[in-house]
Image (spheres, rainbow, N blue to C red):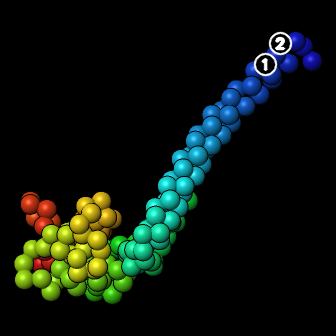
Amino acid sequence: MTDSVMLGRIAARRAELDLLEEELVKRLADVRVERDELVVAERVVQRISEQGFGEYLSLAPALPEAQVGGRSVLLIPARVGDLDTEALPPDYQRILAIVREAAGPVKVKEVGGRLGLPVEVRGKLEPLRGKLNKLADRGWLRKLGDGRFTIAF
């Protein structure tokens, strides 16, 4: 085998290894990000537990779940036709029932109060705000310009 052939094979193998290294670096970065997210989630759960907000944890995603990109995500279907609220997880059904029972558009704080959340601390309502926004994005609710929510017709 000539030197030029061997050098060509070495260069080709080096290029393969460089690509593999890039892929592994990206995967390692993704793993580290997800691990950091889990550490934060663990701290949040511990704080909630320590502060006695067990009912707050009941708003955590329940069923159904799916895997997207290796992560569990809650499935909130888009409202299509006469799709029944039974298609939603129980905590989302409770949120819809509260909005439906209201005399008019409701604020996140009002819904949180009905759910028994500590409404005096704004940060405690952010997960609920996210759920209301998700329901609005999927057509179950309508978000008004002032940030209040009402049932979508």
The local secondary structure at tag 2 comes to: helix
Figure label count:
2
Depth check: give the residue in front, 53 or 37. 53
Seen in the image, is 140 located left or right of residue 4? left
Does residue 74 appear anywhere in the picture? no
Quadrant of the rendering where the N terminus is positioned: top right
> Is there a contact, CB below 8 Å, between mark 2 and mark 1?
yes
Q: Assess disc 2: are there few (<14), some (14-19) or many (≥20) residues with their C-alpha within 10 Å of its C-alpha.
A: few
Which residue is pictured at 46% across the width and 64% down the height?
47
Q: Are there few (<14), some (14-19), or many (20+) residues within 10 Å of tag 1?
A: few
Q: Position of residue 128 (x, y in %)?
A: 29, 68
Residue under circle 1? 8
Residue 121 vs residue 37: left or right?
A: left
Q: Could you say which disc has been placed on residue 60 in the image?
A: none
Q: Is residue 90 visible?
A: yes
Residue at left offset 34%, top offset 74%: 77
Which of the pair 139/123 is nearer the observer?
123
Q: Nearer the viewer, residue 97 or 4?
A: 97
Residue at (54, 57) in percent of width and height:
38
Left or right: 39 as drawn, with respect to 96: right
Looking at the rendered image, the quarter that the C terminus falls into is bottom left
In the rendered image, residue 40, in percent from the top left (x then y), is placed at 49, 55
Q: In the rendered view, would you say 101 is above or below 72?
A: below
The residue that mark 2 highlights is 4
Q: Residue 118: name its quadrant.
A: bottom left
Of 145 and 114, which appears nearest the observer? Answer: 114
